Every structure is written in structure tokens, then in C-alpha cells.
Image: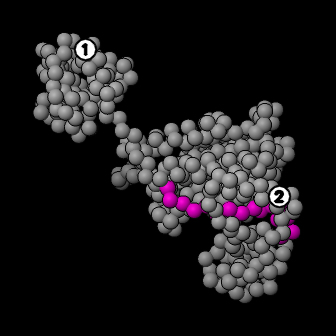
């Protein structure tokens, strides 16, 4: 065996406790916000049949064409590490007959996702998403609610952002529009980038995403789908916008907004943050009224979003949760067990507590307590002393019970 240095694979990272605390805090925030809007916790496997993503996300998308971690299991099945969560949520909705439950069924999730992309700041091969999906109703208030929930999450995470919003109409509108757009692209084919030219048939909409100068000029004059919506789609979109206006959320109508997944219908949106640089998308989503049916279920509308955990933390200012533990110091080897017991009792009283566990001198223990920003130090020797770390005041207590009462009182007074 070669003895090279072992490292986390390219495009992946370890979460160390300082960062982990910020993630915990973000997760608690998301669980609370989404939970109060009726979104229940949902988990699905991190790998699924490859076919789910081919059918769900779309065979012509970058995700399916280039970015999936696909492997064969020992039984010869083709499996893929999930690149996104909506297809899995819809699969689960069908598999568990969730259409029989009261609608809409609202799901929230947090977990790892995998895309084989070129790694850079804010772009990884394994990343975490927070997501929310509402299935079983096409009520425009669900679109608005979904957008407002993500806006609220970003606001409370300290993320400066702008919201881009559009509507893609229904599948028929998109087919008819696709034809118009293809005709426009073919007319001016010579001005387009090779990549866009190669995709005119498969996915002409993606031309709106191009950075190529010639292509951009062509796209500026391209017909716009938003001008061709069916009346009920236009009305649906107007209602979503009215609800957002009522809520005082600023957005930019952007008919060039194309999301990198094929399942969208009607509302699509994306939040961008300028503090992220090239990877400016912090979260996005939209409606996917055809997806459940496409995966073999009954016709079922749906709407939702996902946001990148690492991108929220990069762009935002989520403070780590402060624990300010009580530190239990040991003044002499023979008091080790008594100190251990006191730390346990303090935790049982609902506080954070740590006990000396590395054989430090008393001076070293007090320094250690200072470094962890302990609120108090309980010094266990022949007697027991409690030192309030903010005032420096030190008192003697009669026994362990009183020590616990004192630190509990101290932290309550804080
Ligand atoms: P998405 O836009 O592909 O949508 O991904 C959502 C978010 O995941 C992005 O805005 C970004 O913050 C984060 N993200 C994506 N790729 C990476 C990466 N390589 N590294 C770090 N972060 C990344 C979806 O996944 C849809 N399933 C959203 C949705 C839910 N639509 C409807 N329901």
C-alpha cells in the first residue's frame, strides 16, 4: 500500500466544531421557521436509483449529464448519490401514498447532496442543503409562502440578497415557446457559442444562462416566455406577485431566469447574494406541477426550494450558539470522582458543564476555563468553591448541591 498523506476527497470538507456550531444554529433556525409553517421533518436516502434523477431532473441537464456520482452496487443496480432533494421527495410521496393524506403535504429536509462540479469557493462536491417542499396543492399562496420562508431564513441568517422571480407557465406553453426560441436561435446561429449551438434542440432555454457575448446579444432580442403565458398561468403568477407585494418583499421580474433542472412549471425564483462572488445563488426553487406524475404518481402539483448551507454561512453572519459552560476544576487527584459527579449534576440541572480531563495544574485549569469562556468555575478540593468568571468573585459552598444551586442561580441571573 502506498503511504500518501490522507486527505478528505477533492471538493469535500470536514466540519469542525466551531463551524459545526454555526451549522447547528442555522439548522435550529430553519427547523423552527419551517416547522411553524407546517413543514414536517423528512429524510430520504442519500442514494437512489439513477433512473429517478434521469426522469426527475431531466436527461439534458448539466446535473444528469456531467455531475452525478453514479455507481453500480454489488447486485448490478445503477445507483446515484442524490444531487438534489425534490425528486426523492416526490418519489417518497408516491411510494407512501401521501396523496391520501390531507393536502398539501409539507416536508422540510437538511442533509448532504453530491455534484461532481469543479470545486471553488462556495461550490463543493458534497454540500448540504436545507429544503422545503409542499405537495398536493397549486394554491398560489403556497408559492408565496415558500418564497417568504426562504426570505425569512436568509434575513435571520444575515444574508444580503436579491430575489429574481419569473414564471415558466405549463408544459404546453413551454413546448410551444421552445419552438419559437429554437427558430430564433437558428436564425442567428452564427453568433452563438458552440455550446449553445449544440444544445438548440435539446435545451434551448439554457441559452439564457450563457456568458458568451454573441449569445447574450442574441438572447436580448429573443422572444420571452413570460409574454406568452396561458391566461390561468398568468393569473396564478399575478396572485403570487400580489401576495409578495403585500408582504413587502422586493423582487426583480427576470424572464431570463432559468433554473438548472427540468421539472419546473409556473413560478421559479432564485435568491442571489453579491457577497458570494461567482457562485451567487444562495437558494432557489419553484413549482413542479408535473413531476410527481412523471415519476409514476397521480397528477400532483408541488412547489419548494433548497438553499445551500455553506453558502448561507459564507454570505451571512450566523453567530455560533454560545454555551458558556460551567467548568469543574479538580484541586487534587483524590477529588476526581467528586468533581466528575458535580459536572454530571450541573448538566442534569440543565446547564452546560465540563470537568477537567487532561491532568492540568490548577493554574492551567483556570486558564482553560477562561479560554472556553466558562461562566463559572467550581473548584473541588477538600472544600468546594464557586468562582463567578464575570465578576471574579469566589464563594465557599457547603456541598455539591449548593454548588449546583449557585451556578444555576448565576446562569439564571445572567
Ligand atoms: P439548486 O438551485 O440546484 O436547486 O440548488 C439549491 C441550492 O443548493 C443552490 O442555490 C446552492 O446554494 C446550493 N448548491 C447547489 N450546488 C452546490 C454545490 N456544488 N456546492 C455548494 N452548494 C450548492 C435544487 O437543488 C432544487 N432541488 C431546489 C428545489 C426544491 N426546487 C423545488 N424544490
| Disc 2 crowd, CA 10 A, few/some/many (<14, 14-19, 20+) | few
Q: Residue at x 67, y 76 (%)?
A: 195
Q: State the extent of the magenta-drawn residues as a range.
A: 159-177
Q: Mark 2 sits on what residue?
A: 235
* Relative image position of residue 97 (x, y in whole percent): 79, 34
Q: Residue at x 19, y 11 (%)?
A: 398
Residue 34 versus residue 401 in the image, above or below? below
Residue 322 is left or right of residue 108, and the answer is left
* Relative image position of residue 6 (x, y in whole percent): 38, 51
Q: Is residue 378 visible?
A: yes
Answer with the quarter of the image where residue 59 lies. Answer: bottom right
Residue at disc 2, secondary structure: helix
Residue 280 is left or right of residue 219, and the answer is left
Q: Is residue 76 visible?
A: no
Residue 362 versus residue 277 in the image, above or below? above
Give the Cα separation between the discs numbered 1 and 2.
67 Å
Residue 350 versus residue 254 in the image, above or below? above
Q: Residue at x 85, y 73 (%)?
A: 179
Q: Earlier in the sequence, mark 1 or mark 2?
A: 2
Frontmost residue, 395 versus 310:
395
* Relative image position of residue 43 (x, y in whole percent): 62, 37
Answer with the quarter of the image where residue 391 lies. Answer: top left
Answer yes or no: disc 2 within 8 Å of ligand 1.
Answer: no
Q: Residue at x 68, y 47 (%)?
A: 145
Q: Mark 1 sits on what residue?
A: 402
Answer yes or no: disc 1 within 8 Å of ligand 1.
Answer: no
Residue 99 is left or right of residue 241, and the answer is right
| Disc 1 crowd, CA 10 A, few/some/many (<14, 14-19, 20+) | some
Whether residue 167 is in magenta: the answer is yes
Frontmost residue, 223 versus 263:
223
Amino acid at each position: 500500500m502506498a503511504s500518501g498523506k490522507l486527505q478528505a476527497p477533492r471538493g469535500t470538507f470536514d466540519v469542525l466544531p466551531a463551524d459545526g456550531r454555526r451549522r447547528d444554529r442555522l439548522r435550529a433556525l430553519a427547523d423552527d421557521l419551517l416547522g411553524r409553517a407546517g413543514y414536517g421533518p423528512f429524510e430520504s436516502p442519500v442514494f437512489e436509483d439513477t433512473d429517478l434523477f434521469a426522469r426527475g431532473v431531466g436527461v439534458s441537464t448539466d446535473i444528469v449529464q456531467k455531475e452525478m456520482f453514479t455507481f453500480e452496487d454489488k447486485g448490478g443496480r445503477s445507483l446515484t448519490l442524490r444531487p438534489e432533494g425534490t425528486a426523492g421527495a416526490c418519489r417518497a410521496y408516491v411510494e407512501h401514498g401521501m396523496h391520501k393524506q390531507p393536502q398539501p403535504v409539507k416536508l422540510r429536509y437538511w442533509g448532504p447532496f453530491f455534484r461532481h462540479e469543479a470545486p471553488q469557493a462556495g461550490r463543493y462536491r458534497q454540500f448540504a442543503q436545507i429544503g422545503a417542499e409542499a405537495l398536493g396543492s397549486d394554491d398560489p399562496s403556497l408559492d408565496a409562502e415558500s418564497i417568504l420562508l426562504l426570505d425569512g431564513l436568509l434575513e435571520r441568517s444575515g444574508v444580503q440578497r436579491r430575489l429574481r422571480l419569473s414564471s415558466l407557465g405549463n408544459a404546453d406553453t413551454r413546448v410551444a415557446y421552445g419552438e419559437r426560441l429554437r427558430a430564433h436561435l437558428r436564425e442567428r446561429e452564427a453568433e452563438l457559442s458552440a455550446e449553445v449551438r449544440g444544445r438548440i434542440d435539446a435545451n434551448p432555454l439554457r441559452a439564457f444562462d450563457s456568458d458568451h457575448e454573441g449569445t447574450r446579444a442574441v438572447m436580448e432580442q429573443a422572444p420571452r416566455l413570460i409574454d406568452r403565458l396561458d391566461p390561468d398561468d398568468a393569473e396564478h403568477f399575478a396572485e403570487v406577485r400580489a401576495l409578495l407585494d403585500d408582504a413587502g418583499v422586493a423582487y426583480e421580474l427576470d424572464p431570463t431566469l432559468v433554473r438548472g433542472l427540468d421539472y419546473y412549471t409556473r413560478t421559479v425564483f432564485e435568491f442571489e447574494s453579491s457577497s458570494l462572488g461567482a457562485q451567487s445563488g444562495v437558494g432557489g426553487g419553484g413549482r413542479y406541477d408535473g413531476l410527481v406524475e412523471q415519476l409514476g404518481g397521480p397528477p400532483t402539483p408541488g412547489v419548494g426550494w433548497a438553499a445551500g448551507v455553506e453558502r448561507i454561512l459564507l454570505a451571512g453572519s450566523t453567530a455560533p450558539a454560545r454555551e458558556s459552560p460551567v467548568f469543574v476544576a479538580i484541586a487534587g487527584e483524590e477529588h476526581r470522582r467528586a468533581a466528575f459527579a458535580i459536572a454530571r449534576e450541573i448538566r442534569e440541572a440543565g446547564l452546560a458543564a465540563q470537568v477537567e480531563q487532561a491532568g492540568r495544574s490548577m493554574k492551567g485549569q483556570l486558564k482553560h476555563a477562561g479560554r472556553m469562556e466558562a461562566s463559572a468555575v467550581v473548584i473541588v478540593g477538600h472544600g468546594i468553591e464557586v468562582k463567578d468568571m464575570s465578576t471574579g468573585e469566589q464563594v465557599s459552598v457547603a456541598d455539591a448541591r449548593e454548588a449546583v444551586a449557585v451556578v444555576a442561580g448565576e446562569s439564571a441571573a445572567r
